[in-house]
Image (cartoon, rainbow, N blue to C red):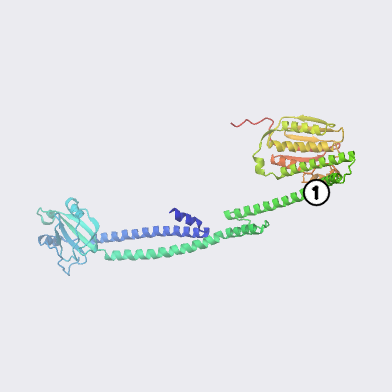
Amino acid sequence: MKKLARRFRTLPIRARLSMLVAAAVAFAVAAVSVTCWFIVQGKLYEQVNNDLQRGMRAPSQMINNALNNCSETPQNSGDSPYRNNYLQLVKEDGAICVLDSSVGKVKITQSDKDHIQNGNTETLYFRDGTDEDGNAVRVMLQPMSTTTLTGDPGPKVGLVVAVSLKGTEKTLNDLALILLLVSGVGVIGAGAAGLAVARAGLRPVDKLTEAVEHVARTDDLSTRIPVEDDAEDEIARLSRSFNSMTASLANSRELQQQLIADAGHELRTPLTSLRTNIELLTRSEETGRPIPAADRKALLASVKAQMTELASLIGDLQELSRSEGQRGERIQVVALEDTVESALRRARLRGPELTINAHLEPWFTRAEPAALERAVVNILDNAVKFSPEGGTIDVQLTGGTLTVRDHGPGIAENELPHVFDRFWRSPSARALPGSGLGLSIVARTVEQAGGNVTLARAHGGGTVATVRLPGAPTAPPEVP
């Protein structure tokens, strides 16, 4: 059985659907056919029983003659109205007296004797039996009292009236054959209909399969499956999901290719500068002509700066390449006030000549702690980078809104829509260190925490960065 089940599961869905439909129809047709056959059988037997009751009662004179002249063989009286029936008396000791005109003798069973001995004389008993030649008959037995028949006490007897079931059995056999043929035709038709329905129903699945195979074969993510706008069935939902998936994959690939291209462009400048400086140092060693100490010190400082820029760029790229699943595993409740305090300590080290004023109120939000601190550090780094020497930076955290305002040159209005794009850098800031990924990382981190970030020109000059994060001023209770 398990082997058949495994083999069934290996069949194509179309074949399995056809077989299941055929099996369901076969079961239904078989149930209806069997029920119909038994109903017809019951009706035919009921008709036979009624005929036996209405027209097969022997007159008392015939019964008395049989009792007085008991014969175990039919007398074959051709003029009797009962010439098509079996008529006989059965005594309680089992002796049989066949009445005139009986067509034969019915075999008596022990149950007949029990009914004659203990049965009610007003009750008729029916059963199936056979005659002495083995032919099927329908038997009716009526227990009778000889006292009632002859006036003299005597043994109990039973009147047995039977009729041949040959015609009834032929009708039932013909009906069974017809039902079998109809059932067979119905099952075959159901199988064919199931196959047609399966083909029609699975046609969208075939299209989906062809589309998936085409994508796997050609790597063409522009493939789309046509779906009717008003279709809401499972196949339509699956097709829309596939179209959404391929669109997302195509967009992801496009972003990946753009990231690679931008990263290659950004890496080329520091690598070229680093290579030039290293070649100068190597050539000096190979030719034996030393570079002046001041120039050598400047070259080494440039190499160190370029290596630092490369390390920062690689770190930013790694941050951008992390998947959502990796981030989701590290999400927790973060005290934003402590995160900003930690970022401020790092910002003060990078801009010791600047004055940083901070006013922080408690706020708790759900985010990845390290990523959120990096985002705040990036915002403060920008403020430090563009602040004039001896300038002031104002930092405020109130009600889940963090604002960082510097007093630098500010950002041009036409540049504001691009500040969060990857690798975008203002023309006026391209001479400064940086990769153009800092604010992009800020935007992504804040959005993943459910907040938003904006950058705008401040009144009186400078730039103000605003970060809004959902949360509460108090920490939620810990879940045990």
Q: Quadrant of residue 167?
A: bottom left
Please state if 295 lies on the left or on the right of 47 as rendered. Answer: right
- Work out whether 81 lies above or below 328: below
Q: Residues within 10 Å of mark 1 (few under 14, many from 20)?
A: few
Pinpoint residue 10: horizontal percent, then vertical percent. Answer: 50, 57
Q: Amino acid at mark 1?
A: Arg
Pinpoint residue 445: horizontal percent, then vertical percent. Answer: 71, 40
Element at badge 1? helix
- Work out whether 64 lies above or below 279: below
On the rendered image, what quadrant is the N terminus found in? Answer: bottom left
Residue of label 1 = 268
Pinpoint residue 134: horizontal percent, then vertical percent. Answer: 22, 63
Front residue of 88/186: it is: 186
On the rendered image, what quadrant is the C terminus found in? Answer: top right
Pinpoint residue 252: horizontal percent, then vertical percent. Answer: 70, 50
Return the residue found at the far bottom. 78
Front residue of 355/293: it is: 293
Front residue of 321/399: it is: 321
Return the residue found at the far front. 288
**Residue 160 visible from this viewpoint:** yes
- Label total for image: 1
Please state if 199 lies on the left or on the right of 59 as rendered. Answer: right
Please state if 124 lies on the left or on the right of 458 as rendered. Answer: left
**Residue 225 visible from this viewpoint:** no
